[in-house]
Amino acid sequence: MKIYVLVKEVPDTYGDRKLDLETGLADRGAGDVVLDEITERALEVALSYADKNAGTEVVALSMSPESATASVRRALAIGAASAVHVVDEQLRGADLGLTAATLAAAIRRGEPDLVITGNLSTDGSGGVIPAMLAEHLGFTQATALSAVEITEGQVSGTRSSDAGTQQVTAALPAVISITEALPDARFPNFKGIMAAKKKPLEVLSLADLGVSADPAEAPHTIMTAVSEKPPRAAGVKIVDEGDAAAQLVEFLAQNRLV
């Protein structure tokens, strides 16, 4: 079985995050960048299956700037057998539509049986890429899984919600996304780090994939304005002089909270 795992480099959750007000894009120089934790968990799902099933090939796939090579190598150090890195200046600021089309082209080229992703990244938090990939590829899908079981011909799992849990099953080939309920990824050891330097890492461009970023051919979202998040304003203080309840109701009504 061949499993593709989507991995993504993101600004460190615990570091500074800033937007470039000229481009509207994340300022990658404002702090550290790391491999998104949810994508490491997705990688762990694939590797756990590979550990028990000989002949399983796990491939890490990333669409990111050339500077993200170290993060892609980390996926190899954790245990992926090879990696595909899509790098193209035309993808700078790509919206969800172009991102999905590009990733789908890279996946289609590799002909995997299963694609595993996180449910949403910690930077964009779009949460729709898994479903968009399934649509592009014509694969079945099972999203937001909190437990996963992979077998030879299908993948099944549990989707949790406030109302309860749902058991879902999808025939292969399929796209699945997982939540943070899945285990943390294994930590890359020295042997894995050294081995990662010799593992195959294929770099592809849009031309290699036959994907166009021309808005005339592939219309996509256009950002019209960007600004810094306004400073947090002081809250409203209600002093109880016998009318606190009325003040609270009025406040909630003014803010359309009731």
Image (spheres, rainbow, N blue to C red):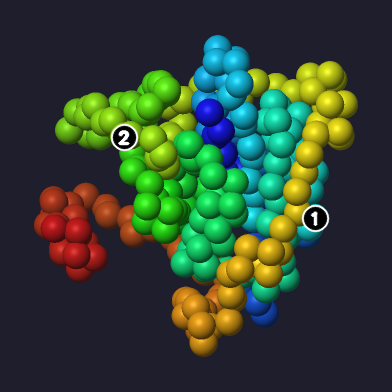
Residue 183 at x, y = what percent?
51, 22
What secondary structure is marked by label 1? Answer: helix
In the figure, is residue 210 to the left or right of 101? right
Residue type beneath disc 1: Ser
At x 43%, y 49%, the residue is 130
Vertical arrangement, residue 221 with respect to residue 12, above or below:
below
Residue type beneath disc 2: Ala
Identify the residue position indicated by label 2 in the image: 170
Residue 46 at x, y = what percent?
55, 27
Toward which corner of the image does residue 61 lie, by quadrant?
Answer: top right
At x 80%, y 55%, the residue is 67
* Relative depth, front residue between 5 and 249: 5
Toward which corner of the image does residue 257 lie, by quadrant?
Answer: bottom left
Identify the residue position indicated by label 1 in the image: 67
Residue 105 at x, y = what percent?
55, 58
Q: Earlier in the sequence, mark 1 or mark 2?
A: 1
